[in-house]
Image (cartoon, rainbow, N blue to C red):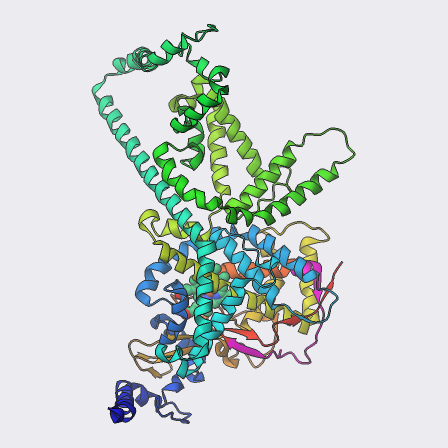
Amino acid sequence: MLLLLFVAVPVLWVLLFRYRRRRMYELASKIPDGGLELPVIGAAHKFIGTTEVATDPVDLEMVLKTCLEKDDLHRFLRNIIGYGGIFAPVPIWRPRRKILLPAFSPKIVDSFVPVFVDQSRKLAEKLEERAGENKFSAWPFISSYTLDSVCETALGVKINAQGNDKSPFLVELNSILQLACERIFHLWLQPDWLYKLFPQHKKHEHSVKALHSFTNDVANPIVIIKYHKRSSALAARAKAAKEVLAKLGAAKRAGRKCGRVTMLLLLFVAVPVLWVLLFRYRRRRMYELASKIPDGGLELPVIGAAHKFIGTTEVATDPVDLEMVLKTCLEKDDLHRFLRNIIGYGGIFAPVPIWRPRRKILLPAFSPKIVDSFVPVFVDQSRKLAEKLEERAGENKFSAWPFISSYTLDSVCETALGVKINAQGNDKSPFLVELNSILQLACERIFHLWLQPDWLYKLFPQHKKHEHSVKALHSFTNDTFLDLLIHFSGGEKGYSNLELREEILTLTIAATDTSATAVGYTLKMLAKYPDIQQKVLQELDEVFGDSDRLFEKEDLMKLKYLERVVKETLRLFPPVPFIIRKVEEEVSLPSGRVLPAGSGVVVTIWGAHRDPHYWGPDAEQFDPDRFLPERFDLKHPCSYMPFSNGPRNCVGYQYALMSIKIALTSVLRSCRVVPDMEPSATPQIRVKLDIMMKAVDGYEIALERRK
Ligand code: HEM
């Protein structure tokens, strides 16, 4: 037994291992550099990191188009984030990618500008506090910025990592990625049974638990709430649509039978008469009871004394009666339909069958713990309110309404939608204007009978204003990625909660460190090359002057030099320096190399970006102007691909560029990076690899205030 265990089994295993990989060894032996053969894996390791395969953009293009499967090593990442897009096997990835793509359309990415602007201002403030000090690591600041932005855009949640030096999510995220990296690079940590014997396993379990508890605390209630909200909304909408269609069908059938004259008669005489009769018949008990109300008084033509039930003090002030009414009459009055057609079946005005399940879902979102988490929003917004009111101190009487309503609107939008609409900073906030207009219109309909029937309302000018305001209001409720994924995956029949959480966690991980690394490297480049920094600052001054105005989407187009600097930084220091794909079927590359089935292939973005054949003899030098339109001549699409290439490339590249540029703009409008000159045009930064490629020094920089 013991002999079998210690000798025969390993020997058999090695033989089987080599036999299965015989084609791989055969091809690997043809790699010209020869070199080391390792005992178990032979020369197969040459497929990992061989520059021949990885740096030729022509080969790279083929690899990225044909090898869509991620290498098996990704299983150490999959067991953290599940089958979220980035590392998912192709059959799972393909349909998910289809759903993900429209969520990154330019229009949607553009709608996130206010989030980036807001979060980048916080980043700038935090960094400004360190201005004048010695060098410090910019990494915690930048990565908190990217995490905050991602959580707000993906989930609509403000986690305020920037306000919390030791954001638990970031700590655990860094720890788990480091552990995954350690597993990838240490063979003995790879088999699960062996890993369990090492102390890393305990840390790993702890971090996974912590990360999932984050998604449970923060994302889960929201995922569930939004998911269910969306489901019942869809169900309600489908039902309403069916009813309307049914009614339309009936009306059409009736229409065919009637002649023109009968139609006219029906329209002008019979219908109103029938309507009044029906109206009175249905309210017969109401009239009977109303006649008993002692104050007598006006009887109106159509509604008789029914109006006495609206606002009579007898009914309304007796708490004993009130209690009964509030317990038994849960349905809202029909007049609410004029509000419903603005906000749909949102809780407040929904009919009871829709309201009841929604209420159950809504309640936990108002738990004391969640409400407590909104304190920073109220603090922040109320300070703005105080500032605004203070400006009016010493003046004559003024209406406080616009100030207070802007405060509540700002707070509500931030806590409910995760969107800062800055109504307080804008006297004529379009959202407030439209909101006031629509509520006034709804009120007008409620109190004017002739505006109530939909077909009649359409004839009045109010209808046009109403349509305009509803459209405008809907355009303000910015969708988060979560909403979009629910929507694009098919709403009710779409992603399960688990799938949603996987996708959202994936987005969070894919977007946080990558963009933060890019900001970090760019700041270091600006320190190394002060003349380049000067040009960036000059461009910012031309666009923004001395003003403190908020960044607007249109500014992105104007900051052309900054864009070149970011692109050149991404060329020399791509945050994802290589990608490992799996070769499922043998692939013959254009260069003649053959990749055996079952091997892994390393696509070195780093190598392609520094290849003198494509970038010239000065390929290693930092020169943003090589991206000038007149100089830029991309010889091959895979010679520049910080966001990869082919069908499985980065979906978030526009989002990333926007987030990076807005962060840099906010920081550089208030501070300059203190020069730390690089003696040559070839920048030297010590880097380390932990899934992303990061600077060893944590992006140490020093800052000074510009004003
Ligand atoms: C500078 C910042 C970023 C860099 C350098 C970067 C780089 C990459 C690269 C190289 C890949 C492709 C891997 C492959 O080909 O196998 C990728 C995939 C991906 N990235 Fe990014 N990324 C960045 C930012 C973002 C952001 C901000 C988001 C989302 C908001 C994002 C979401 C994704 C997703 C979902 C995938 C998987 C796509 C798929 O497999 O279909 N990335 N990224």
Q: Position of residue 523 (x, y in %)?
A: 63, 68
Question: Looking at the image, which residue is at 45% across and 13% down?
Answer: 308
Q: Is residue 242 left or right of residue 202?
A: left
Image height of 656 relative to 521, above or below: above
Q: Residue furthest right?
A: 394
The quadrant in which residue 167 appears is: bottom right
Let me know if residue 673 is in the magenta part.
Answer: yes
Let me know if residue 245 is in the magenta part.
Answer: no
> For the magenta stretch, what is the residue range?
667-689
Q: Position of residue 212 (x, y in %)?
A: 44, 61
**Relative to the observer, which residue lies in front, 277 or 200?**
200
Question: Looking at the image, which residue is at 60% across and 35% down?
Answer: 405
Q: Position of residue 470 (x, y in %)?
A: 47, 34
Q: Answer whether residue 636 is visible to the viewer in this image.
A: no
Image height of 281 relative to 544, above or below: above
Q: Is residue 607 left or right of residue 353?
A: right
Q: Position of residue 166 (x, y in %)?
A: 58, 64
